[in-house]
Amino acid sequence: MDLDGLFKEAEKAALHSYSPYSHFRVGAALLSEDGRIFTGTNVENRSFGLTICAERSAVVAAVSSGVKRFTALAISTLDSESPVGPCGACRQVLSEFMSGDAPVRFGGSGGEKVNTTISALLPFDSLHDLGKT
Ligand code: THU
């Protein structure tokens, strides 16, 4: 699966968004080391602080299926024309399960895509390898 295909999966996942408060639909698709795709969408709540972002939904879905390493990520924000990158909390969580050089692509409805990496999204991630000692 290439990044184009992964992005299409993220777009499909965004259609499942539960976002009655923000009306901002987000989908995320993770490619696992063994070539599987795990998707997630944002799930909001009337207690706003309980909202779960699409990226963390995808991580939780994958880990719940026993899959913990990912080689690429795509994020689709259907309700913005321009690309919108992952929030700070999600950058931290994603870095737990992905290498710094893993590619990340995100884009909105306008066709423009940002192509970056986990380490560019979370620079100076000094504790990246702490769990592996
Ligand atoms: N959201 C995500 O799902 N991922 C992001 O990277 C940015 C924000 C969600 C949270 C909330 O449901 C809505 O988008 C507006 O912030």
Image (cartoon, rainbow, N blue to C red):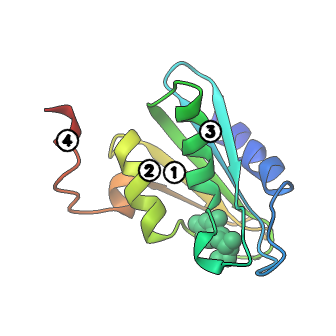
Residue located 74% across and 78% down the image? 46
* Location of residue 118 in the rendering, given as x and y in whole percent from the top left corner: 39, 52
Q: Report the Cα–Cα distance between label 4 and label 2.
A: 13 Å
Q: Which residue is mark 4?
A: 129
> Residue at horizontal 64%, vertical 69%?
51
Q: Nearer the viewer, mark 1 or mark 2?
A: 2
Q: CA distance from mark 1 to mark 3?
A: 18 Å
Instruction: Tell whether circle 3 marks a residue whose Cβ is less than 8 angstroms from ligand 1.
Output: no
Cα–Cα span, label 3 and label 2: 13 Å
Circle 2 — which element? helix
Residue matched to label 3 = 61
**Left or right: where 112 falls relative to 59:** right
Query: What is the x, y in percent for residue 57?
Result: 62, 50
Quarter where residue 15 is shown: bottom right
Q: Is mark 4 within 8 Å of ligand 1?
A: no
Residue 48 shows in the view: yes
- For label 1, the residue is 104
Q: Disc 1 versus disc 2: distance between alpha carbons?
A: 11 Å
Q: Residues within 10 Å of mark 1 (few under 14, many from 20)?
A: many
**Which residue is outermost to the left?**
133
